[in-house]
Image (cartoon, rainbow, N blue to C red):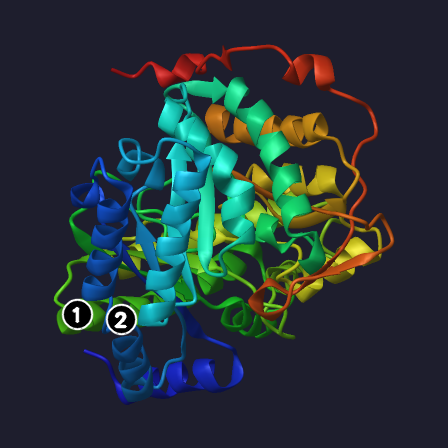
Amino acid sequence: MINISEVLETNNMVAHEKLDVRTITMGISLLDCADSDLNRMNARIYNKITTFARDLVSTGDAIGREFGVPIVNKRISVTPAALVGGNACKDSADFVEVAKTLDKAAKEVGVNFIGGYSALVSKGMTPADERLIRSIPQAMASTERVCSSVNVASTKTGLNMDAVRLMGEIVLKTAEATKEQDSLGCAKLVIFCNAPDDNPFMAGAFHGVTEADAIINVGVSGPGVVKTALERVRGESFEVLCETIKKTAFKITRVGQLVAQEASKRLHVPFGIIDLSLAPTPAVGDSVAGILEEIGLERSGAPGTTAALAMLNDQVKKGGIMASSYVGGLSGAFIPVSEDQGMIDAVSEGALTLEKLEAMTCVCSVGLDMIAIPGNTKAATISGIIADEAAIGMVNQKTTAVRLIPVIGKDVGDTAEFGGLLGYAPIMPVNRFACDAFVGREGRIPAPVHSFKN
């Protein structure tokens, strides 16, 4: 039973601590839309998305009003397009037409993003996978709401270095194709290791092939709520600190569970998972870096940052799994630089470097996220950074990802402006030593020895 004090507490979280449901994401399978004819396939894709998701935005808005909890985004994820379009798409230009169809459908139903312009290539690439990957720069430049992701590694299959090398080139080409917008296209492109099938957060969401025909996944966020709770126990022991984070995560997750179940009922689509990720925004007081500093760091990036983040991530998950039987997706703490004012400040002051961020990704939920780098960074260097991050995920049996933005025409000391939830970011320096010979080797790095568990 929910008592009146819990209702009042939740209302206070919404009013003063920036609690929100960050996204309701409807996953839609497009496997039954596959066809040998491109026009027929695109028509099927458009019709299925606009039929299933026609009431998604209005339902989300209605639930938000009735429950008094802001539901910030309504989104769609679809089956990886490389799997759906393999028969109809004879070249990269055909895949761009699929991206435009997804964009048109997203605009029709009113969602802010649609994810699933994706390929899964952790062990090898089919011709369709490669065609889709090579189409990404043009697809990102010619659409507004389409997000793309490529899974290049997994603990079970190893690290596909051919795909990593290609993705370094694709990131640069995407940056060039969208250079008039500070290379914004790269903000909609994620390279994964161990990508989850049920992630509701963009830009990495896609609808996994193991999922039902349609599903509702909800992402809840509340860095401000956690920070406020920790302010009340300032100076207390680690035991008190951990208990506070767990209890707060439990309360946040219960809000998400309630919204997810109601959305599932009203849309007649099964409930999938709750993703409890502390996802920051550029708004003051809505920062993961702010939580780390409340724990006791002068600035994020100071010695102790990785330990503090590990503790935060673990306690968030422990609290979440007590509140819902179906916690999934990424669930933990996000550390995107451009979307977190505290991270931006730490970078600007020299407290936080690319190398420290990489260390932090060993213990958090995602990876090197929304990081702006000089536009003249070489493709091989970007591939090397992708390989490093994917190796962390592969060896540690966790999801890691890279969302780097080489901002064409800008260098260290400049700032890139992305707008909205994507925020802005200072251009971060990149190690100047080359890795071309390493990245240039063909093949894949084998799976680690602990992958053999059959």
Which residue: 28% across, 35% down? 88
Circles 1 and 2, Cβ within 8 Å, touching? The answer is yes
Q: Is residue 251 left or right of residue 174?
A: left
Picture quarter containing residue 319? Answer: bottom left
The residue that mark 2 highlights is 56
Q: Residues within 10 Å of mark 1 (few under 14, many from 20)?
A: some
- The spot of residue 274 in percent (x, y) is 31, 58
The residue that mark 1 highlights is 267
Q: Assign a secondary structure to mark 1.
A: helix
Instruction: Say which quadrant the C terminus sits in.
Output: top left
Labelled disc at residue 338: none
In-front residue for pair 205/333: 205
Which residue: 32% across, 87% down? 65
Residue type for callout 1:
Leu
Q: In the displayed structure, would residue 380 be above or below residue 336?
A: above
Q: Is residue 261 left or right of residue 420?
A: left
In-front residue for pair 302/295: 302
Q: Is residue 330 visible?
A: no
Indicate which disc, 1 or 2, sits on the residue closer to the N terminus.
2
Picture quarter containing residue 66? Answer: bottom left
